[in-house]
Amino acid sequence: MKRLIIVFILLLIGGMVIAQEGQVYWLENVKIDGEFAEWKGLKPMVTKNSLYGEHKPRDAEGEFVLATDGANLFIYVDVKDDTPRVNTFHNSLAWKGDSVEIYFGTVSRYHEDYEEGDVQLRLVPRSAEDPFENDFYVSYDFFGGGTDVFGEAAVVISRRGYTIEASVPLEELSNPNISVGKMTRCEFQVNDADKIERDRLLRWSSEEDDYYTPANWGRCPVVRP
């Protein structure tokens, strides 16, 4: 009992938040081809925290899986959306339309400000016909972010929502040398616009719209499937 009290006091003093527990899978030979067989059977991290807009499992709930082969970060997202819409906003404003955010970093200790390697990535569906016509870029990071498209991504839009797989070299995220057992920090977000602009925002770990801080990101060790 005394030990639990001490731990609780230390958490209060440090301002720490007990974050969600997730995982990053060690996977090799992932192909970004718009087919998603390699992701089956892996436990996803699901966005159920509604920051605004009602949480509806069939509208804007996203299942996220992260993986790595040590050289790349691989991303899988399956979003249930009853009105999926191609995003026509400029990349600097793409959060206003249907899109997803992946927050990732390898600074495993609690910290409130972005450090080198902490990134907010944005994946933006741009076409219902061409799965490879989309945008994938750093939206916010230690250096200020940007909207230059990079990496590989495939987006398949259907009547039930949209599915994404993507990859980016870890060196481009200032996170080289990731291996099994490495602790990472992760967070996920779904932006949903049923009409013109975003009217629903869901996240996995945090219950706040705190894109500017890694404080509430979940803890996601690299594990073998």
Image (tube, grey):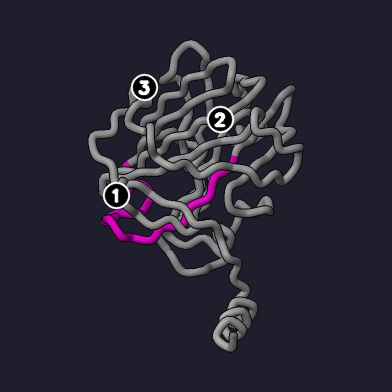
Disc 1 marks a residue whose amino acid type is Arg
Tell me the quadrant of the picture where the C terminus can be found. top left
- In the rendered image of this protein, does residue 158 appear above or below residue 16? above
Q: Please give left or right for residue 5 compared with residue 34 in the image.
A: right
The residue lying toward the viewer, choosing from 152 and 109, is: 109
Tell me the quadrant of the picture where the N terminus can be found. bottom right
Measure how far apart labels 2 and 1 are at the Cα level.
25 Å
Residue, x 36% and y 22% (percent of image)?
35
In the displayed image of the protein, which residue is found farthest to the front?
1
Estimate the x, y position of residue 14 in percent, counting from the top left. 59, 77
> Disc 2 designates what residue?
79
Measure how far apart labels 2 and 3 are at the Cα level.
15 Å
| Disc marking residue 224 | 1
Secondary structure beneath label 3: loop
Residue, x 58% and y 32% (percent of image)?
99
> Disc 3 designates what residue?
35
The residue lying toward the viewer, choosing from 179 and 45, is: 45
Find out whether the residues at labels 2 and 3 contact each other: C-beta distance under 8 Å.
no
Measure how far apart labels 3 and 1 are at the Cα level.
22 Å
Within the magenta stretch, is there residue 97?
no
Disc 3 marks a residue whose amino acid type is Glu
- In the rendered image of this protein, does residue 45 appear above or below residue 39? below
Estimate the x, y position of residue 97 in percent, counting from the top left. 65, 29
Find out whether the residues at labels 3 and 1 contact each other: C-beta distance under 8 Å.
no
The magenta stretch is: 169-189
Specify whether residue 107 is in view. yes
Q: How many marks?
A: 3
Nearest-to-viewer mark from 2 and 1 = 1
Find out whether the residues at labels 2 and 1 contact each other: C-beta distance under 8 Å.
no
Estimate the x, y position of residue 2 in percent, counting from the top left. 59, 88
Disc 2 marks a residue whose amino acid type is Val
Q: Residues within 10 Å of mark 3 (few under 14, many from 20)?
A: some
